[in-house]
Image (cartoon, rainbow, N blue to C red):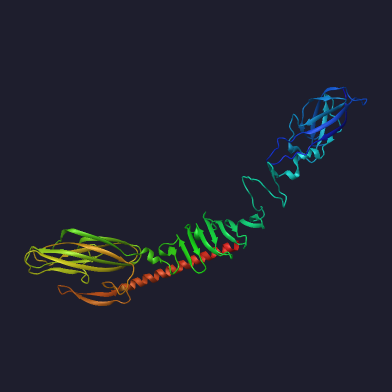
Amino acid sequence: MRVKFVNSVMAGIAIFLLATVAFAAAPTTISYQGSLTDGAGAPVADGQYLLQFRIYDSEAGGTTLWNSSFRQIDVVGGLFSYNLGDTVALSPSIFQNNADLWLGVKVGTDSELIPRTKFTSVGHAFHAETAVSALSVEGDPFVRKSGDDMTGALRSPGLNLGTANTTTGYLNGYSQYGPFRTLDIGEFANSHYIGLINATTGHWSASMEADPNGGGGGVLILRRNSAGDVGFYLDGNFGGSEEPAFGITGSSRDVQFNMGIAGDESVKLPDDAISSTEILNEPGIATVKRTNWVPLTQGTGVMEDVCIVTITIPTSGYIHLSGNINGITYGTTGRNYGRSQIDETSGGSYYSSHGMYWGGDSRAGTNYHNVLHTRTYFKSAGTYSFRLEAEAYLTNAAGAETKTRGWLLATYYPTSYGSVITTTSDPNEFTDAKAISIEDIDGTVTTAYEVDLRELELRAARLRAETAEAELELISAQQAQAEQSMNEKR
């Protein structure tokens, strides 16, 4: 049976298929109405007819984009109606990706009716241009239109501020007084930052920045006034050292802590605050005591240890040693002497300017002796060992017995409050050394040098001051550079 397609109507509703929310109640079909007539132009008999609907991208030929397959359609008085997409769903992409579309209709085994019917805006309502990035939640639509208010809870796996062609983005807030800038987000050559804006001044009140040195650290800065001057900074990789530093900067005073610097200079405090020299170098002591008697070997003239004390000092200063020797001489009525001293070297030579003799000649029985020793050193920070040592005099009489025991105390003092006079055999460390002669018990005369240990203290203090000044200049330069960089970024 040959039938003719007389007319058709596509009536639809503009369906906004949103990017993320589909409305269950909204239709997703297009209503299509037409009429069928026979060869004489009369309506076909009432009944069910097999009809097939196809959508093409061309008026003739072209590609089939959608196919309903054959459907039993009721025809009454030659008229029929069918909802395109009722059985085989219509994809919005068909209308999104094609500017022009045509509908073809085939009845039974007859050829497809011609001409095809062109779709108008009804079909393209499946993809409304204004709804490309629209989002809706129940009762509160979020819109892109400038000046519109957005209400409700916004949820997103990511939020972009700025564009691909800019290096900064910003976030504005709103209050009863109008809009105000609240946050800047951007990038520099080697880092990214977030800046919190003061609504009154327009300056950054606080900022966080990824490590500008590229070492994986970070920088936090809090500003102290409306001009944006730095008040507090914390840098996890200060100056690229991979060591943290932080500072508090006032209008005329500042505090700095830098873990990349060793010693007292790692902390900088105001001049009238607790200084670094008062924090780390309080006086301290170490002591040792030998209670058993040490028999000294006769005829060797070699110093033997009575007791050894070890002390660790935190910074340069004086180590004052005081020790006491208890000696016993017996076994002969001839010469029987012992001699003792405080020294650093094991088995060292007897030094007459610091040592003491005890004992005597032609003494019968057992004789007891008590000798006090003192000696002072100036040392840099470190650990040191000192010994109270003694020896039997080399020319003691046959049968002489010489024994000793004692104690030794080491006391650390960070500074002096007057001259610290001692003697030394090596004057090369001193610019003002006075030569003196010392006569031993056997008449031997040796030359020693009288010196003031304060010369070493003042030299060490000058070196510390010069080192500290250089390090503080470096810190100040690095801080000024950081402040300038952050001020330029405000």
Query: Residue 423 at what x, y percent from top left?
Result: 26, 73
Provide residue 233's location: percent of width, then percent of height. Answer: 51, 60
User: Can residue 400 be seen by looking at this rendering?
Assistant: no
Q: Position of residue 103 (x, y in %)?
A: 81, 33
User: In the rendered view, does 312 fall on the left or right side of 291?
Assistant: right
Give coordinates of residue 123: x percent, y percent: 79, 37
* Quadrant occupied by the N terminus: top right
Res 63 quadrant in image:
top right
Picture layout, residue 198 above or below residue 463 = above
- Residue sitting nearer the eye, 209 or 57: 209
Image point (74%, 37%), residue name: 92
Q: Is residue 154 left or right of residue 50?
A: left
Q: Residue at x 50, y 57 (%)?
A: 237
Which residue is at a point 28% across and 62% down the rendered structure image?
Answer: 285
Q: Which residue is drawn at the image coordinates 23% and 68% (left, top)?
A: 374
Q: Quadrant of residue 26?
A: top right
User: From this viewpoint, which residue is outermost toward the right?
Assistant: 40
On the question of residue 365 being in view, the answer is: yes
Q: Nearer the viewer, residue 397 or 461?
A: 461
Where 468 sits versus 60, above or below? Answer: below
